[in-house]
Amino acid sequence: MTTMRRLWLLFAQTITVLLALWFIVVTLQPQWLGALPGSRPARHITTSVAMLEAPANATAPGSYRQAAQRAMPSVVNIFTSKATRQNTNPLLNDPFFRKFFGEREEAPEDKQFSLGSGVIVSAEGYILTNNHVIEAAEGIEVALADGRKASAKVVGTDPETDLAVIKIKLTDLPAITLGHIEQTGVGDAVLAIGNPFGVGQTVTMGIVSALGRNHLGINTFENFIQTDAAINPGNSGGALVDTNGNLLGINSAIYSRTGGSMGIGFAIPVSTAKLVMDAIISNGRVIRGYIGVEPQDITAELAENFGLATRTGAIIAGIVRGGPADKAGIQPGDIVVAVGDKPVADMTSMLNLIAQLTPDNKAKLTVLRQNRRVTLDVMIGQRPRARTSTDSP
């Protein structure tokens, strides 16, 4: 019995000493515990002051690193230039003044540079960007994320959607993967990649704030993705991607009173961009339907003043003489309520529906005339190339 008691006392004393040592280590040298099996030790930095450093392979939770790394090589910087001559006083061309002031050399040419972004969408060298980025440019240079540079030629432009396609001749181009905008919803996280203010390639993060934005007066055909990801001057033509790095849209415009980002940016959906790009590559331009009318939205005041039975549709305010609508018998004051079997909600939807029609084919337009429905066959014409975004449909 005495032997058992001694062993028990020895065991208790040993446990007490070990607990005391453990308490001292936890209190004074907790980094020693990092050496225990299964633990991830923090590095001890050898400096004049003892500090801890996270493990080298630590990854921040919720990071979008992989999406950015996947998409960034496909986003390029675009530099455009236009040669201009300095303004000189016309009096210096007069022989009388030349006699006193002598002959002067011609003013040297200046180069005006502008910055924008673009997205490589094909390994063949096709790049999507905004029309306003390359508009009126005499020279276009593209700088890739890997440091390579190349001159680009314009394949075609579409001012009515503010899209353009340019092409470079380089090998091993990192083409971006196109995403599915129809599977995107408000609240989804997105990344905007571009070259804001010319500082270099930059990634910003936000969410999809809204889909199908129109009536903004930015383009003729509008169906914008709205996002609060920071988009600034120079981001134009850059990529809006999902959290997998797939292209959802081409960054195009911002709402701003100062010129900087205010959390309201707009991107052209990838579905629109793909249709425009395919048409430009195939035909050099986008061919759209046209009937030659000047439509207006039906406001509450118009509906009340004219006793209209509907507030949906587009009212015809004017007609191009000799145009398709004029030949079909459409009259000012008619309200277009359907194109084919598709209802017309407003002027924008009418514009989009007619633009999708194939020229030189007949289409049925349903109009309200004095509150009676009339169906007319219209031979669709080809929409003229637009110089501005205010041309009629």
Image (tube, rainbow, N blue to C red):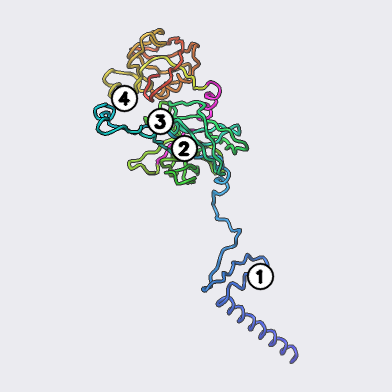
Identity, as a three-letter code, of the amino acid under mark 3: Asn
- For marks 4 and 1, give the CA distance: 75 Å
Residue 270 covered by magenta stretch: yes
Residue stretch in magenta: 264-283
Q: Tell which tag, 4 or 3, sits nearer the viewer.
A: 3
Marks 2/4 in contact by CB < 8 Å: the verdict is: no
Residue 211: x, y in percent? 45, 35
The kind of secondary structure element at disc 3 is: loop
Kindly indicate the quadrant of the structure image that contains residue 327.
top left
Q: Tell which tag, 2 or 3, sits nearer the viewer.
A: 2
Q: Which residue is mark 2?
A: 79
Between residue 300 and residue 127, name the one nearer to us. Answer: 127
87 with respect to 160 (left or right): left
Q: Tell which tag, 2 or 4, sits nearer the viewer.
A: 2
Q: Residue at x 41, y 32 (%)?
A: 83
Q: Which mark is residue 299?
A: 4
Q: Tell which tag, 4 or 1, sits nearer the viewer.
A: 1
- First in sequence: mark 1 vs mark 3: 1
- First in sequence: mark 2 vs mark 4: 2
Crowdedness near tag 2: few (<14), some (14–19) or many (≥20) residues, C-alpha within 10 Å: many
Q: Give above or below for 274 relative to 209.
A: above
Q: Which residue is mark 1?
A: 36
- For marks 2 and 4, give the CA distance: 44 Å
Identity, as a three-letter code, of the amino acid under mark 4: Thr
The kind of secondary structure element at disc 2 is: strand
43 with respect to 269 (left or right): right
